[in-house]
Image: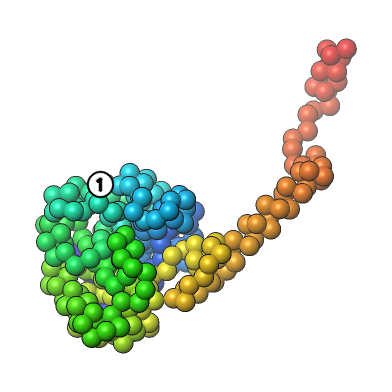
Amino acid sequence: MRLIAKFAEMKTQGEKIATMTAYDAPQARAQAAAGVDAILVGDSVGVNILGYASEREVTLADMAHHTAAVRRGAPDTFIYADLPFATYDTPEQAVASGLALQKAGANAVKFEGAHPDIVHALTSAGVPVCGHIGYEPQTGERRVHGKTFEEAQRLREEAKQLDAAGVFMLVLELVPAELAGIVTKEIKAATIGIGAGPATDGQVLVFPDVLGYTEKNFRHNKRFAEVGAAMQTASAAYVAEVKSGAFPTLSNCAAMPADVLEQLCKKAG
């Protein structure tokens, strides 16, 4: 609970919460060293790392596997992990899934949609919950949500319902900045924006987007590096040197002691 309380305290003090997705130990290690406040093991691992067509293909086993890897890379960092599609259809199923991810190393879980009953079930079982509304990648349409009065009011009410149910954090994805600001002021839980403007209590981005792994960039994202281009350049240089014989050289391998080599040569003769 001490770790959970940290986010409420940061919200009260106006200290921004920095969080990113990570999917393996090296990514988690880098983020922990950088001082990230929390790491999300997102179901975005499916499309960004595993080559799936959508988040809906990600399994609970996938999430447990990657959560454990992230925990090994960041043993002291707060980690929250996505409950994948079709693993929280009932409170009982949600609890079983949440406990599995907790066992894998997650401090908390995140799921999409306004389901207060699922929040109650998880928290009662000792699994803290981060909510997620707005664009919901598992089931929703990829667009800005909340631009009409009716939709904005619905999202506002969903945020209040989840807050009352006991989420400690709420992700607002692809919602207008003004709506995100209103919700942030109206609920106790810390709000984490992605494409929701600067008024939220913190931000989350997908690490491959931040690194520039992917060809496509998004308006809500900022590329802080171009690792994808560097990977391609390095791969091309390696292939060229292997083909030409420039790599490896003797400096890249171990030399045999001269006396042993002499004995081998005599034996061969």
Relative horizontal placement of residue 6, taking residue 265 as reference (left or right)? left
Q: Quadrant of residue 213?
A: bottom right
Residue 13 visible in the picture:
no
Between 225 and 4, the one lying in front of the other is 225
Mark 1 residue type: Ala
Q: Residue at x 30, y 53 (%)?
A: 84
- Residue 115 position in % (x across, y down): 16, 64
For disc 1, the marked residue is 100
For the N terminus, the image quarter is bottom left
Q: Residue at x 34, y 63 (%)?
A: 137
Residue 178 visible in the picture:
yes
- Residue 132 position in % (x across, y down): 27, 67
Between 62 and 127, the one lying in front of the other is 62
- Residue 224 position in % (x across, y down): 54, 71
For the C terminus, the image quarter is top right
Between 160 and 8, the one lying in front of the other is 160
Residue count near mark 1 (Cα–Cα under 10 Å), binned few <14, some 14–19, many ≥20: some
Q: Residue at x 52, y 70 (%)?
A: 217
- Residue 114 position in % (x across, y down): 19, 67
Please tell me whether residue 264 is drawn above or below residue 226 in the rendered image: above
